[in-house]
Image: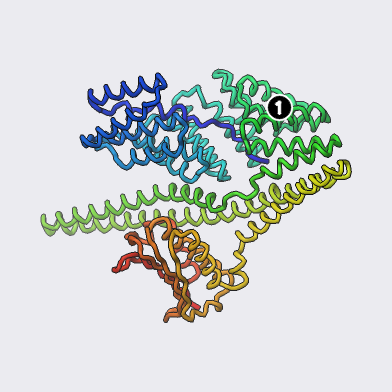
Amino acid sequence: MKKLIFISFFLLSILTNAQNRVENVNIGPKFKTLFIEFENCVDAKKENCIALLNNIIKKGKSENVPFLDYLYFKKAYYFWNRKEVDSTIFYSQLAIKNPNPTVKERSDLEAHNLLGSAYYLKGDLHSAIENFLKVANILEDGGNPIHLGYLYSNIATLLGETKNDDKQLEYLQKSYHLLKENNDKRFIATVASNIGLLYYHVKDTLNTVKWSEKALELAKSSTDLIALTQSNLTLSLIEKNLNKSEQYAKLSVKYAEELNDKSHTARAYTTYADALEKLGKSTQALKYAENAVKLTQEIGDKNNLIRASKTAGTISYNLDQKEKAAEFFFTYAIWKDSISSVEKTREINEIHAKYETEKKEKQIVEQELKIQKQRSNFLYAVMGSLFLISILSGIFIYNRSEQKSKLKQLQQEKENSILNSFILGEERERRRISQELHDGVAAMIGAAKMSLESIPHLSDEKKLEQLSKVKNILDDTHSDVRHIAHNLMPTVLEKEGLIKATSHFASEINETKLVKITVTDKSSNIEMLSPQLQLMLFRVIQELVNNIIKHSQAQNAEIAFSNGENGLQIEISDDGIGYEGNNSTGNQGLYTINQRLKSIGGNFKITKKQSGGTQAKVVMSL
């Protein structure tokens, strides 16, 4: 069942308008007067307001003011209020690139928040989470704790969309405790109801009931209709007593209608329809299911339309209304987003793995600085006296040993964190494939079956129309199955080996004209490697090519296979700006490649070429 996380994006209406940094910016009387003129123009809904704002920015640039980030943020916020998302992103990025020299007067917090909100509306969860995590880093350093609690809840919502249940629960719990500590009355009930719903989806019945009832109790003092709606829905789903389940679902409909929100009302209608159907009240259930479909179509809520149309189709079929059932199942099959973007989900989870390991890396740096400081103190102490030298040497050696032990422990914890992220990623991939087959392919085949069963009851004209719909469903199903199979094992790699698969991959990149890639094979004897090792090397090549496209600004690249003294060599080089980092610790993706190759006896090295560009070398014993 699709997750029903209903929590609103609070930051879109609260955090953007309530930041101390923006209020503290000292722009002087001249610019204040100009902004008053601009704001009066906006309030009067005149057409030349953007021209006034452009003149303010032009004046600020010509005078080289330190608050240029504030001016760009104001322009980004102007476009945000006009729902112009791309312009919001552009000017928010400019605000971040031009920071105020005074930290307390910077607009980076507001700009990152706008960016996260805008990317969310565009459907780019990767960038949305990245920017909200940057907002969290700023707020964690002495920011408003209630705003931080709202932000944690929003991050949890995005994690729910990536199916990262563990991290979602962690951020919801952090949000709840922060709001509780700071006596928040406004949204704590909704956060509690989300925790209850998440426990329902991980099949933890005791915690589901505990948190849903806690949310209902909290909602009584705040009249939080979202929490009342959602908690009653959750209790209706988990209640084994059908009559009580119907009562909870009916209450959720009542509160959703009072909330006057079509999205919440549609969800409540669908759940109520399910409860009525289980009690044998199919005619009444169909009415609510049809209303849910209608509401979701009106507001363009695809996720809820999928669930509502499936429920309506099932009830119609049980009522022997097969033509109507076929129509609902056809809607379900067409809109079901059966193939999630595997690459995007992987990238989003990598962001969170990186976010967790960054704290460990910071501790490592601190430990290294301590060691360096102790070395300096030791050198100063040597100049004092031989007696002090002997004493301080002993202290230094002992402390240095302790610090190195801590440093080693932190390194081990970081490696364990990355290893755990690999294991979790594999588990999520298995669950994703299972869900795609169940919710996507199986549902489409079911829809085709329903449509075929309805054909004998139709006129000749509608029979042809229905057969056409069945053909479209089967075409989509065929494409989905091929896509799933290709993600598991690229066909070219399986049939013709690593060299041909790499050449095919390079030709696909070349068609995009982002970079021109050539592939050469100098008697590499690649066929001596097992298919599993060839697949791992192919994924490494894909990761390195993606890095070239994203970061190198290169126009040309080469992938060369050869047989060196130590075995198979793969060199990936480009003519870009060059890479200055360290492949052991500086970059999460390169660190992952290094660890994977070490685990199978391979070596990896990346260097900046003297002639310009970067060369990455993989060596594998044959």
Q: Please tell me which residue lies in front, 22 or 142.
A: 22
Q: In which quarter of the image is the N terminus?
A: top right
Residue furthest left as drawn = 384
Question: How are the colours assigned in the image?
Answer: rainbow
Q: Which residue is drawn at 65% across and 60% down?
A: 485
Q: Please tell me which residue lies in front, 382 or 167.
A: 167
Residue furthest right as drawn = 456
Q: Is residue 285 left or right of residue 265?
A: right
Q: In this view, does 449 lie to the left or right of 389?
A: right
- Image x and y of residue 254, in percent: 67, 21
> Which amino acid type is shown beneath numbered disc 1?
Ala
Q: Is mark 1 on a helix, strand or loop?
A: helix
- Image x and y of residue 600, in percent: 50, 69
Q: Is residue 613 left or right of residue 525?
A: left
Q: Please tell me which residue lies in front, 126 or 367.
A: 126
Instruction: Inspect this view and state whether residue 146 appears.
Output: no
**Is 419 situated above or below 314?**
below
Q: Which residue is drawn at 37% across and 68% down?
A: 615
**Label 1 belongs to which residue?**
249
Figure quadrant of residue 230: top right
Q: Please tell me which residue lies in front, 418 or 76.
A: 76
Figure quadrant of residue 93: top left
- Image x and y of residue 275, in percent: 76, 30
Structural crowding at the residue carrying mark 1, measured as other residues with C-alpha within 10 Å and reported as few (<14), some (14–19) or many (≥20): many
- Image x and y of residue 470, in percent: 77, 49
**Is 138 situated above or below 425?**
above
**Is 503 situated above or below 36?**
below
